[in-house]
Amino acid sequence: MAYDVSVVGLGRVGLPLALSFADRGLAVLGVDNDPQRLATLAAGRMPFGEEGAQEQLDRVLPAGRLALSGRVPEAADAEHIVLTLGTPSFSHIEIDMRDIRSALDDLLGVLRPGHALTLRSTIAPGTTDWVAGYLAKHRGFEIGTEVYVAHAPERIAAGRFLVEIGTLPCIIGGVGESSGEVVGRLFEVFGAPIVQTTPVQAELAKIWTNILRYATFALPNLLMMDCEQHGANVFEVIDLINRDYPRGGIARPGFTAGTCLRKDFTFSEERSAAPGMLLAVSRVNESVPLFLVQGLRRRLGSLSGRKVAVLGLAFKADTDDERDSLSHKLVRLLERELADVPVHDPHVATPTVALEEAVEGADAVVVATNHSEFCTPGTLRTIVDRAASGCLLVDPWNCWGSAQVFAYASEVAALARSS
Ligand SMILES: NC(=O)c1ccc[n+]([C@@H]2O[C@H](COP(=O)([O-])OP(=O)(O)OC[C@H]3O[C@@H](n4cnc5c(N)ncnc54)[C@H](O)[C@@H]3O)[C@@H](O)[C@H]2O)c1
């Protein structure tokens, strides 16, 4: 075959994976049905930020180790086909497998004995067995001895791909006799420990990795809302909980979302034996922007015509990924209050204004994303110097160390002079 591995879906998961396979010396075909993405890559440019990925692209493209195609059937020119397609959730709380199903249908006619199909996308429990059954039903393959199917979930955090691909245990759940072993040999190239399990356990391990994080962050977010109700300070309560306490601790509040956390819980919820618990977790995290808007209203009165600057559109710190970010929800809610809402974020593709312009004369400034450059005395100084007198600073992350979710600029001005 012309390639060692094809990676279908060159998004935030697939592209760093394809580059990393190629950088380890494999002949890789990257497949995506977005012509613009392919053109950007063919021109040697990364379409999004991922630490070290541009350097990998600079190495593997001129060396001819990464070829590109817009046609999914061409993926069959490799022994290994890895699907890294998006798996959103329908609003019905049900996995949307349309991209996976479409790629499978494109591959059905060209799969041959010896092919290994790996699902790298996050999927609902049972999906790997369904894919195996689909191939067996339509092509009559013996899965596990003739054609191989496995789930090898991606658990790497954005921005940490190149480090974690070589260290994070790689979970593999293969169908039938040999799928796990065959797919394990592909991922061995990265040197991380390979952990073999069943397909459904691999699926559960991935989605529950993210459910754990989603629920972990919902607790301090709920506590933040409780504290506001009781006139308490959430950061002081968190310190009381955690200080010298030997049995774990509570995380800190903030905006908790992004394409993974925001939907992966639905893959459990869709067939849950105790439905509702994870939906409640989601409702807590989704309520944080409204909680901040209501807090602003309680302190400033009507927001109509007031200038409320929002810092950060990305879903988390130091990334350019703004998909499923609660910052966008915050902006929408503020605009529904008829506030004027300038936004500043130096990382994202959406055009935003400069920090100075965003905060000039602002009645309030909200830190929606705790980007590193926001959490400095210099940024705080710019705000204190330029915002309206009586400006309210909203910092659920405690990124300036004021230990107050809502504080007036005059109260935190001393922190701006601490450098
Ligand atoms: N983004 C993350 O940090 C992350 C982390 C862990 C797991 N995941 C999971 O990995 C999967 C991929 O996520 P992502 O963020 O990379 O998605 P993405 O939307 O960034 O990438 C998907 C890519 O597939 C392409 N595509 C869609 N349909 C196609 C088709 N039929 N044929 C060829 N290409 C097609 C799109 O153009 C896009 O480039 C999802 O299941 C996600 O839940 C994502």
Image (cartoon, rainbow, N blue to C red):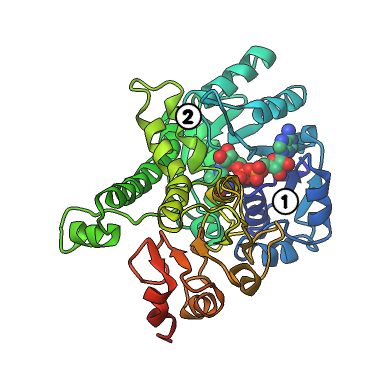
Q: Residue at x 49, y 62 (%)?
A: 367
Q: Residue at x 57, y 59 (%)?
A: 306
In depth, the one of 9 and 372 nearer the eye is 372
As drawn, is 99 to the left or to the right of 367? right
How far across and down, in percent of the image, does residue 129 sit?
52, 22
As drawn, is 42 to the left or to the right of 311? right
How far across and down, in percent of the image, does residue 351 sit?
72, 60
- Eyeballing the image, is 356 above or below 110? below
In depth, the one of 179 and 260 nearer the eye is 260
Res 27 label: 1
- The local secondary structure at tag 2 comes to helix
- Eyeballing the image, is 368 above or below 177? below
As drawn, is 187 to the left or to the right of 400? right
Res 267 label: 2
Quadrant field for ligand 1:
top right
Q: Nearer the viewer, mark 2 or mark 1?
A: 2
How far across and down, in percent of the image, does residue 335 sit?
61, 49
